[in-house]
Every structure is written in structure tokens, then in C-alpha cells.
């Protein structure tokens, strides 16, 4: 069996009731970066927690899924996905 590198779609949530949707190769390092962020959207809170993660075999598939969810522009659909 070969060595596979997976890319991940992730959804994080903070106490301020905000969701952030992104994709990365390393979910836990990326979450740590969001928690320590000093600029950008995720810098507005320091209590982000991982709510959803889905793995893909290519970066392009992870980004495609990320864009699809962002295009929903619907908290209800995101919460349904998270379940």
C-alpha cells in the first residue's frame, strides 16, 4: 500500500456563533494556526473548535467541496452537514 497524502475540508466554530470553512493538508496544525491568528477572520476569536472534517485524495477535490459549502451561504445547511 502506498503512502497517501490527504487533503481535508474543515469547518470550525467559535463561541461567537461563527463558522469558518477551509481546506488544508494538516487539520490540527491549521486549527492551531487559527487559534493563534493575529489577523484575518479567525483572529476575531480564540476559541475555535473543529466541528467537521472530510478527507479527499486531491487538493482540487477538497477546494471544490469547500467552495460548494461556501456558496450555500446557509448556516442551516452547514449545521445539517455537521449533524
Image (tube, rainbow, N blue to C red):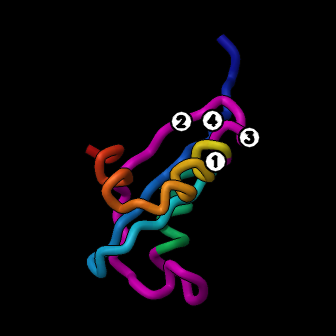
Q: CA distance from mark 4 to mark 2?
A: 6 Å
Q: Are marks 4 and 1 in contact (CB under 8 Å)?
A: yes
* In front: label 2 or label 1: 2
Q: Residues within 10 Å of mark 2 (few under 14, many from 20)?
A: some
Q: CA distance from mark 4 to mark 1?
A: 6 Å
Examine the structure image and report whether residue 40 is included in the region drawn in magenta. Answer: yes
**Marks 4 and 3, the one that precedes in the sequence:** 4
Q: Quadrant of residue 7?
A: top right
The residue range painted magenta reads: 35-63
Residue 55 is tagged as 2
**Marks 3 and 1, the one that precedes in the sequence:** 1
| Picture residue at 34% right of the left edge, 64% below the top | 49
Q: CA distance from mark 2 to mark 1?
A: 9 Å
User: Percent from the top left, x then y, of residue 44?
Assistant: 45, 87
Name the residue tied to disc 1.
Answer: 25
Q: CA distance from mark 3 to mark 2?
A: 12 Å
Amino acid at each position: 500500500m502506498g503512502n497517501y497524502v490527504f487533503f481535508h475540508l474543515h469547518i470550525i466554530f467559535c463561541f461567537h456563533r461563527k463558522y469558518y470553512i477551509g481546506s488544508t493538508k494538516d487539520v490540527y496544525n491549521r486549527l492551531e494556526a487559527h487559534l493563534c491568528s493575529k489577523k484575518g477572520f479567525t483572529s476575531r476569536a480564540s476559541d475555535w473548535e473543529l466541528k467537521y472534517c472530510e478527507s479527499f485524495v486531491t487538493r482540487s477535490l477538497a477546494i471544490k467541496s469547500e467552495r460548494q459549502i461556501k456558496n450555500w451561504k446557509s448556516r442551516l445547511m452547514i449545521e445539517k452537514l455537521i449533524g
